[in-house]
Amino acid sequence: MDAMLERMRRAGVQLVHRTGRLVVESERPLSDDQLAFIREHKADLLAAIPEHRPLHPHEVQRITAWLDRIGERDLAVRAEVLELADQDPVQRVAWLRSSAEVAEA
């Protein structure tokens, strides 16, 4: 399953777990193989993919304060950081850690 998921990621297919549903995001139509894989392994995919949780207002405040402290004023960059933090749990954790480190300094 990991190899197929990696091939799908490289092909630009993103699988997201939202409130018990598997959401498939792709700029191109999925291949028959990709569709068959998703249908066959839906329960396993839902179990393997962490459920999407929107940013909490407190997290938005922490990341925004961190952006202020590092001098990031570009509104497009700030919006992109918040969007990535909302969509990517790994990136969210990284930026929240950075915000804590800068706050302690």
Image: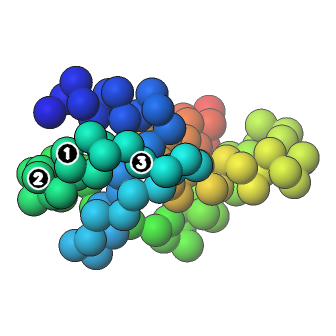
State the image coordinates of residue 58 (x, y, percent, origin top left).
53, 68
Q: In which quarter of the image is residue 60?
A: bottom right
Q: Residue 37 carries which label?
A: 1
Q: Which residue shows up at 67% across the image and 47% down it?
A: 81
For label 3, count other residues whose C-alpha is less than 10 Å away and answer few (under 14), some (14-19) or many (20+): some
Sequence-first disc among 1 and 3: 3
Residue 36 spot, x, y in % from top left: 21, 49
Q: Which amino acid does label 3 sit on?
A: Leu
Marks 3/2: CA–CA distance:
15 Å
Relative to residue 17, is residue 43 drawn left or right?
Answer: left
User: In the rendered view, does 16 fall on the left or right side of 41?
Assistant: right
Which residue corresponds to mark 2?
A: 40
Which residue is at the front of the view, 89 or 93? 89
| Label 1–label 2 contact, CB within 8 A | yes
Amino acid under disc 1? Phe
Instruction: Give how far apart the Cα atoms at labels 1 and 3 are.
Output: 11 Å
Q: Horizontally, is 6 left or right of 90 in the view?
A: left
Residue 43 appears in the figure: yes
Residue in view at x 63 percent, y 64 percent = 61
- Residue at 26% x, 71% y: name it: 21
Which residue was labeled with disc 3?
A: 30
Q: Residues within 10 Å of mark 2 (few under 14, many from 20)?
A: few
Amino acid type at image mark 2: Glu
> Where does the image place residue 76, in percent across and percent down from the top left?
84, 51
